[in-house]
Image (spheres, rainbow, N blue to C red):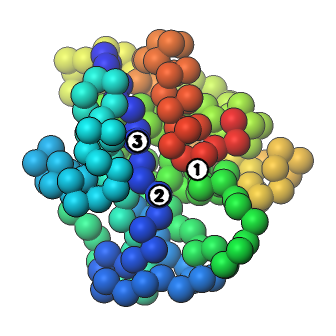
């Protein structure tokens, strides 16, 4: 893997992309990241705020876009095109104390929802999210399983086996969920790239790193 892009993610829209209605305070909804072709992304950003020239990353790439979908629409099967990843969350109440844009439970859900990812960007995204949770002691790293590339023409793959907490909201004091182990592919990005993506994620998702 070579170059990584900045993940410049928009703030919540407050509007259901399926129905066009406003999402109400206290309502459950699904926050979705989409990765459309450049032409569609550029058109969406031109119509939005901030202006498009302020949303490019250091490599001149355009950012992922975010759409919000009411839970009933999502559960009924609505999916936006070019879906990248998603997590469930709740519309804050008016004047509610500001919280992190994406909390620990949402980070874990977003990471788990990328389990079938095949694209380099998604694999790197998932790997760094796992490292963030590992550093917070919300994941336990059990071992690394080395495997031959299934297509037979790539490098040996390193799969990290993790065990999560039973209840991530309890922080690192909670018990480990031995029945929910999962694997994350190491995309073999170097320490500088990991640090760069971690800092970008901390900024755009307002993570408590």
**Distance between the Cα atoms at labels 3 and 1?**
16 Å
Q: Residue at x 47, y 64 (%)?
A: 12
Q: Residue at x 30, y 86 (%)?
A: 19
- Residue ID for mark 2: 11
* In the depicted structure, whether residue 131 falls above or below residue 146: below
For the residues bearing labels 2 and 1, Cβ distance under 8 angstroms: no
For the residues bearing labels 2 and 3, Cβ distance under 8 angstroms: no
- Secondary structure under tag 1 reads helix
Q: Is residue 13 visible?
A: yes
- Residue ID for mark 1: 107
Residue 76: give x, y in percent of width and height: 35, 85
Q: Which of the 4 image quadrants contains residue 59?
A: top left
Q: Is residue 147 visible?
A: no
Mark 1 is surrounded, within 10 Å at the Cα level, by few (under 14), some (14 to 19) or many (20 or more) other residues, namely: many
161 or 57: nearer the eye?
57
43 or 31: nearer the eye?
43
- Secondary structure under tag 2 reads loop
161 or 34: nearer the eye?
34
Mark 2 is surrounded, within 10 Å at the Cα level, by few (under 14), some (14 to 19) or many (20 or more) other residues, namely: some
58 or 3: nearer the eye?
58
Which callout, 2 or 1, points at the residue further toward the start of the chain?
2
Circle on res. 8: 3
Residue 130: give x, y in percent of width and height: 58, 37
**Distance between the Cα atoms at labels 2 and 1?**
16 Å
């Amino acid at each position: 893997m070579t170059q990584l892009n900045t993940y410049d993610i928009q703030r919540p829209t407050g509007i259901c992309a399926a129905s066009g209605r406003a999402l109400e305070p206290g309502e459950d909804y699904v926050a979705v990241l989409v990765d459309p072709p450049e032409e569609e992304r550029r058109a969406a950003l031109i119509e939005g705020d901030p202006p498009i020239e302020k949303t490019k990353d250091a490599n001149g790439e355009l950012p992922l876009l975010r759409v919000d979908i009411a839970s009933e629409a999502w559960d009924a099967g609505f999916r936006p095109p070019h879906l990248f990843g998603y997590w469930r969350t709740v519309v804050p109440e008016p004047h509610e104390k500001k919280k992190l844009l994406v909390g620990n439970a949402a980070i874990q859900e977003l990471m788990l929802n990328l389990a079938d990812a095949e694209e380099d960007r998604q694999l790197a995204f998932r790997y760094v999210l796992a490292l963030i949770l590992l550093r917070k002691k919300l994941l336990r790293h059990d071992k690394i399983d080395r495997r031959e590339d299934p297509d037979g023409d790539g490098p040996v793959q390193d799969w990290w086996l993790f065990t999560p907490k039973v209840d991530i909201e309890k922080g690192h004091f909670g018990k480990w969920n031995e029945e929910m182990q999962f694997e994350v592919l190491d995309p073999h990005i170097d320490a500088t790239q990991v640090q760069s993506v971690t800092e970008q994620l901390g900024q755009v998702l307002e993570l408590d790193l």
